[in-house]
Image (cartoon, rainbow, N blue to C red):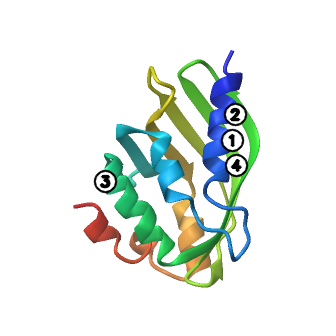
Amino acid sequence: MGLLQENFIREFCAAWGDGSAQSRPQVDKILSMLAEDAVWQLWVPGGPVIRGRVALRREIERQMRYTSHNLCTIRHMLSSDTLVMTERDDYALSSGKPMPHSMVAVYELDEQGLIKAWREYLDTADLAKKKGVALDQVGGPGLDEAKH
């Protein structure tokens, strides 16, 4: 049970990049793996919630303006037919600064096997410290406009 769903999430994570400077998120592929009305909570607790493919595209493209070298390394994965949880070590450069961080991501899947809800649990204080910004700026430039 869940092997198909786990492979789907492995493919989803790989679509964000291979960690090289040349690699960029495959936005169209990522969006095709999300339900039309998918919801992404950027971080838990308290992070912004992005709803629907149009807003999700804007958010991914916003992040691409200041991040590069994206790599998701899955350490552990748990699954059922409708839920996949990953423990990951992610990496990116954010405004030129290395941002390695550990996280747990939870993906809820709909009847078609697409991601309908996605939440990421991570230490935003650690990221703020690494970026050298106030905690309310951890989401990067333009986040306030992206939420509207």
Q: CA distance from mark 2 to mark 4?
A: 15 Å
Residue 137 in the image: above or below residue 119: below
Question: Along the line of sight, which residue is nearer the eye, 141 or 7?
Answer: 7
Closer to the chain start, of discs 3 and 1, is 1
Q: Identify residue for label 2.
A: 7
Kindly identify the amino acid type of the residue bearing the numbered disc 1.
Arg
User: Quadrant of the image for the C terminus?
Assistant: bottom left
Circle number at residue 88: 4
Task: Specify few, some or many for label 4: CA neighbours under 10 Å numbering under 14, 14-19, or 20 or more.
Answer: some
141 sits to left or right of 26: left
Q: CA distance from mark 4 to mark 1?
A: 11 Å
Residue 105 in the image: above or below residue 85: below
Closer to the chain start, of discs 2 and 4, is 2
The reply to whether dot 3 and dot 2 touch (C-beta < 8 Å) is no
Closer to the chain start, of discs 3 and 2, is 2
Kindly identify the amino acid type of the residue bearing the numbered disc 3.
Val
Circle number at residue 10: 1
Q: CA distance from mark 3 to mark 4?
A: 26 Å
Circle number at residue 56: none
Say which residue appears at 28% left-offset and 61% top-offset: 147
The reply to whether dot 1 and dot 2 touch (C-beta < 8 Å) is yes
Say which residue appears at 66% left-offset and 21% top-offset: 2
Percent of width and height locating residue 40:
41, 47
Mark toward the viewer: 4 or 1? 1
The reply to whether dot 3 and dot 4 touch (C-beta < 8 Å) is no
Say which residue appears at 73% left-offset and 72% top-offset: 20
